[in-house]
Image (spheres, rainbow, N blue to C red):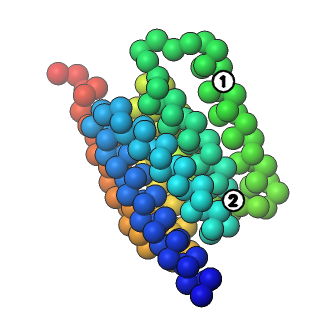
């Protein structure tokens, strides 16, 4: 009975996390600040989701994403040097933990590539480096497709494919905007 309840919870969280994260990508693509808030909500739910799946590198990733997505939502045109230093410190700490996880064998290379792509992609998007951010999102989501397949998380897998498509559309849109007339 307990196993069925856990499977049902995993399925519900998979749907919610996938839906909120996909909404996050679409809203950011459209330039809507509320997309960052959706991302923070998705990351919060993802911590629980990946805890149930024992995907520890994604737990670390999502804790960092809660902070970066919150920063993206609260960020004004002019940023405080102290806040910026704190965001960079959080980024360094998360990257050290992710690197240690890979070095110690707690995570696979695919999970590391996916996590780094998504985390640093978010960092770049919050720092007005959109093209680099979307390229890293594309890499992160593309490698997460493999993880969804291997873990039989089909809704997660489909949302990763959809997020790759949004990332490609964003890259194309930015590329068209930067072409000389």
Q: Does dot 1 land on a helix, a strand or a loop?
A: helix
Q: Tell me the residue that label 1 is attached to.
A: 86
Residue 65: x and y in percent read 56, 42
Residue 116: x and y in percent read 60, 46
Residue 157: x and y in percent read 44, 67
Residue lying at 41% horizontally and 69% vertically, measured from the top left: 155
Q: Does dot 2 land on a helix, a strand or a loop?
A: helix
Name above or below for residue 52 compared with residue 74: below
Residue lying at 79% horizontally and 49% vertically, measured from the top left: 100
Question: How far apart, in angstroms, are the residues tagged by discs 1 and 2?
Answer: 24 Å
Nearest the eye: 171 or 89: 89
Name above or below for residue 142 compared with residue 125: below
Quadrant housing the N terminus? bottom right
Answer yes or no: is residue 109 visible: no
**77 sits to left or right of 106:** left
Nearest the eye: 8 or 123: 8
Q: Tell me the residue that label 2 is attached to.
A: 56
Answer yes or no: is residue 10 visible: yes
Marked residue nearer the N-terminal end (1 or 2): 2
């Amino acid at each position: 009975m307990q196993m069925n309840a856990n499977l049902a919870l995993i399925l519900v969280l998979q749907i919610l996390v996938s839906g909120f994260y996909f909404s996050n990508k679409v809203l950011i693509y459209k330039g809507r600040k509320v997309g960052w808030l959706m991302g923070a909500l998705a990351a919060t739910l993802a911590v629980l989701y990946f805890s149930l799946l024992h995907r520890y590198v994604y737990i670390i990733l999502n804790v960092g994403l809660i902070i970066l997505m919150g920063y993206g939502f609260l960020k004004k045109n002019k940023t405080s040097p102290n806040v910026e230093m704190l965001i960079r410190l959080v980024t360094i700490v998360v990257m050290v933990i992710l690197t240690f996880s890979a070095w110690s064998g707690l995570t696979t290379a695919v999970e590391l590539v996916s996590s780094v792509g998504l985390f640093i992609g978010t960092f770049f998007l919050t720092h007005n480096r959109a093209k680099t951010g979307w390229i890293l999102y594309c890499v992160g989501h593309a490698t997460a497709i493999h993880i969804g397949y291997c873990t039989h998380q089909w809704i997660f897998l489909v949302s990763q494919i959809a997020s790759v498509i949004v990332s490609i559309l964003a890259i194309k849109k930015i590329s068209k905007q930067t072409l000389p007339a």
